[in-house]
Image (cartoon, grey):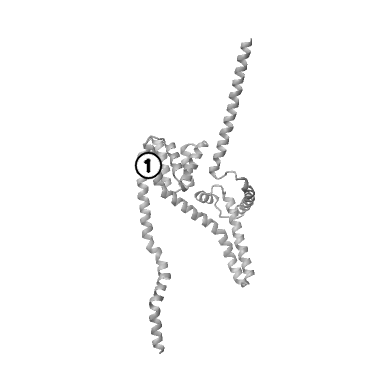
Amino acid sequence: MIFTLIVGLTLLGTAVALVAGAVGAGRARMAQNLGQIGLYGFAIAPPDAQGQSRLRAAVDSLATRVGEMAVGRLTGLDEEAVRKQLMSAGMYSVSPRRFTGYRVFAALSTFLLWLWLGVTMTMPGVLVALVAPVALLAGWVVPLTLVRRRAERRLATIDYDLPELIDLLVVTVEAGLGFGASLQIASERLEGPLGLELRLALQEQTMGLSTTDALRNMLERADTPAMRSFVRSMLQGETLGVSIGQIMRSLAHEMRKRRRASAEERAQKAPIKILFPLIFLIFPAMFAILLGPAIFSFLKAIGG
């Protein structure tokens, strides 16, 4: 009887320990996943920045509400296109409607600033009335233009760094590592936008997505010709069972040829681009310096 009681207590203690371990492991895994969310730009602000974070959160909330009102009333606003531009620019935490709200703020601020300048500098009312719509339009267009330029620079940087990524993947894959481990090593060694995209793709795999879905999401965030070729080659290699090392070696050679062709194209466009400043800025200064003394002497001789 005593032996049976001891065995029962032992089994009960073991069961309690296993349940506690399972609950603790689940909480530890949840805490780890929540900590990894910081890579997406949603990290908790430090204590000294909590006041600023609250103010920023209030402004963001107001901008989101204004953006929702603007999207509902204005026509021609393509939220999907704005979302792609924001993702290409690396602004993952900014929604299209919040960005639209900030565009409304910029337009109103520019308009009111111009009216204030017109009143304080006593400008003519006709001039103020004519330039006011231009100021309003400039405040609406400039934020989107800045985001597009940032997206273009970021995507160009990703295209430029992609051959180095493929070379690194070729070396690690041919050394015997798997594709996921090769991506992990590459994400640790690469910096800049491409390294951030790789870390986001690996983070999505950690959160439960497959490699295929993570690569497709990376292509959606950075939709460039080189990235499109890379993702499609990887997906076809995994689907058909072809050697990934050989595919990536050929892909790196093709991307370098494409980058060389792009550099040659920009070099051929340079003379045409420099034609305007050459004619309207450089030539007048040269003519003034070279012909100015001769014309002055000629006029002086005629006048004498």
Residue 160 higher or lower than 247, as above or below: below
- From the image, which quarter does the C terminus lie in? bottom left
Q: Return the residue nearer the eye: 80 or 222.
A: 222
Query: Disc 1 designates what residue?
Result: 248
Q: Position of residue 192 (x, y in %)?
A: 47, 48
Q: Position of residue 118 (x, y in %)?
A: 62, 69
Q: Return the residue nearer the eye: 233 or 74.
A: 233
Q: Residues within 10 Å of mark 1 (few under 14, many from 20)?
A: many
Going 58% across and 64% down the picture, which residue do you hit? 135
Going 60% across and 25% down the picture, which residue do you hit? 19
Q: Position of residue 174 (x, y in %)?
A: 36, 37
> What residue occupies the far top of the structure in this picture?
1
- From the image, which quarter does the N terminus lie in? top right
> What residue occupies the far bottom of the structure in this picture?
304
Q: Secondary structure at mark 1?
A: helix
Is 232 placed left or right of 140 in the picture? left
Residue 168 higher or lower than 278, as above or below: above
Going 61% across and 11% down the picture, which residue do you hit? 3
* Count of picture labels: 1
Where residue 267 sits, quadrant-wise, is: bottom left
Q: Amino acid at mark 1?
A: Met
Q: Position of residue 176 (x, y in %)?
A: 38, 34
Residue 249 higher or lower than 98, as above or below: above
